[in-house]
Image (cartoon, rainbow, N blue to C red):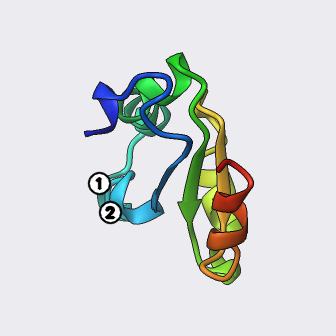
Amino acid sequence: MVNHLTRGEVNVVVGYLHKVIPAEPLRTAALPIMVDNILSACKVHDIPVLLIVPAALREKAEKILSGTEVKIQIVSPEQVEAEIRKYL
């Protein structure tokens, strides 16, 4: 569970965008608040978050996440390993 993380436990949180946001028909204006709540420990402890999104959907993902306060980096599946290594 991401909300129970503390500084020093992990260097980076990695996941798929579709695991953090609800399906398109269920999205509301409260989406940024929902994402911030899910990843609040990352914000509080300054833990980087990498969300995996196919390159073709990057712009759409950035738009969806634009209102969040958590620092989220969107990466394609091909970039994941290189980006994780930057935090290790």
Position of residue 53 relative to residue 3, above or below, is below
Q: Is mark 2 on a helix, strand or loop?
A: loop
Residue ID at (49%, 35%):
32
Image side of residue 76 versus residue 2, left or right = right
Image side of residue 82 versus residue 20, left or right = right
76, 5: nearer the viewer: 5
Q: Is mark 1 on a helix, strand or loop?
A: helix
Residues marked 1 and 2 touching at CB (< 8 Å)? yes
Q: Residue 31's x, y, as percent?
A: 43, 39
**Quadrant in which residue 55 is drawn:** bottom right
Q: Which residue lies furthest to the left in this view?
A: 1
Residue carrying label 1: 26
Q: How many labels does the image show?
A: 2
Q: Residue 41's x, y, as percent?
A: 42, 24
Q: Residue 73 carries which label?
A: none
**Quadrant in which residue 40 is drawn:** top left
Position of residue 48 relative to residue 79, above or below, is above
Residue ID at (67%, 82%):
78
Q: Which amino acid does label 1 sit on?
A: Leu
Position of residue 45 relative to residue 79, above or below, is above
Q: Which mark is residue 23?
A: 2
23, 14: nearer the viewer: 14
Tell me the distance, in whole angstroms, between the alpha carbons under discs 1 and 2: 6 Å
Position of residue 31 relative to residue 75, above or below, is above
Residue ID at (68%, 51%):
73
Mark 2 surroundings: few (<14), some (14-19) or many (≥20) residues within 10 A: few
**Quadrant in which residue 26 is drawn:** bottom left
Image side of residue 47 versus residue 36, left or right = right
Mark 1 surroundings: few (<14), some (14-19) or many (≥20) residues within 10 A: few
Tell me the quadrant of the picture where the N terminus can be found. top left
Q: Which amino acid does label 2 sit on?
A: Ala
Q: Residue 48's x, y, as percent?
A: 61, 40
